[in-house]
Image: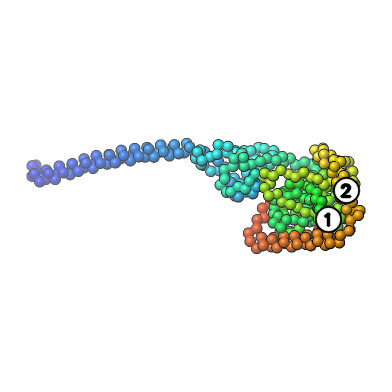
Amino acid sequence: MAKNPMQRQARNSFLIGIIIGLILTAAVGAILFMQMKKLNQQIQAYESALVNVYVLNQDVKSGQELTASMFEQKKVTRDSTPANASDIITSINTSQKKFIAKVDLSTNTVITNSMVDTIDDVTTNDKRQQEYNVVILPTDLMTGDYVDIRLMLPNGEDFVVVSKKTVTIPMSNGEYLADTIWMDLGEDEILSMSSAIVEAYKIEGSKLYATKYTDPGIQEAATPTYVASREVTTLMDSDPNITEEARAGLQARYTDNLKNLREQYIQNAISTYGSDDNVPSGMEESITSTQESRQEYLQGLAGGAATTSGTTGTTTTTNTTTAQ
């Protein structure tokens, strides 16, 4: 059936429109395909540049032990990963050593070899957790801090009894104990502490106190200079609970020079002390002031969000000494 020119023109325009639409659709589809292909290539290139790393999930203090629970795995670009990044998780899980932070570290830090140090963490047969409430503590001392325990005499002589020990501050009824610490000590260190405690009581005006390490991840342990009493050293020589390594360390400490220092200052103070009545009273005032400052500090923490990490579920080793 014949169609008039207007109908043919409309039909042809419709067909042309369809053809043009198909061409445009195909062109757009081709462009989108090329874009998607390019985007996929970029995604693949980006993903191939990603590596798995372990980053800290919490802030860590200098000297604090690093444990596997402190890390989480993240994907980062290879270019943003330090060349000396440490496989810390594998090291922690397979090593017999303890890993500690050399410096303060922030959350999301990628650990490198230069940020950590290792120390032997072999638990010897003579190691015990000891509780002490006779040591004068720094005002801001908290669980995880490293300390030296020192004996100061009225004449100013100062001896290192035990060095670089991590402390735990126990809690009672939800509050930190202001005058009590726990430390893991070997038999030789336990006997040295016992000797120093007794002599701190004997020598009026002396004090047994703790000093904090400011950067324990970097600072080396101080060399103990306190020589225990003759009775204690005799016991040490025959004590089967002291390991050979500890015994050798004690022998190295008991040099003629240190023995002479002991005879000159400590024994002399025990036997002849008492010329200046102001020294004992001044020392007692210093001890009381330190204890009060620490009590105020801990009460302030209790009012805020004080951390209790490391203090739960720990077994106390009984110590029969009384507080100064």
User: What residue did someone put label 1 on?
Assistant: 154
Disc 1 and disc 2: Cα gap in Å? 14 Å
The kind of residue tagged 2 is Gln
Q: Evaluate whether residue 173 shows in this view.
A: no
- Camera-side residue: 159 or 318? 159
Residue 299, labelled with which disc?
Answer: none
**Residue 23 location in percent, x, y?**
24, 39
Is 207 drawn above or below residue 112 in the view shown? Answer: below
Q: Secondary structure at mark 2?
A: helix
Quarter of the image where one finds residue 71? top right
Q: Quadrant of the C terminus?
A: bottom right
Q: Is residue 11 left or right of residue 58?
A: left
Q: How is the image coloured?
A: rainbow
* Residue lying at 67% horizontally and 45% vertically, measured from the top left: 217
Q: Quadrant of the N terminus?
A: top left
**Disc 1 and disc 2 in contact, CB within 8 angstroms:** no
Earlier sequence position, callout 1 versus callout 2: 1
Is 228 drawn above or below residue 285 in the view shown? Answer: above
Quarter of the image where one finds residue 10? top left
The kind of residue tagged 1 is Pro
Residue 264, labelled with which disc?
Answer: 2
Is 79 drawn above or below residue 108 in the view shown? Answer: above
Task: Please tell me how crowded label 2 is: few (under 14), some (14-19), or many (20+) other residues with Cα within 10 Å.
Answer: few
- Camera-side residue: 189 or 273? 273
Q: Evaluate whether residue 253 shows in this view.
A: yes
Q: Is residue 195 left or right of residue 100?
A: right
* Residue lying at 86% horizontally and 58% vertically, measured from the top left: 204
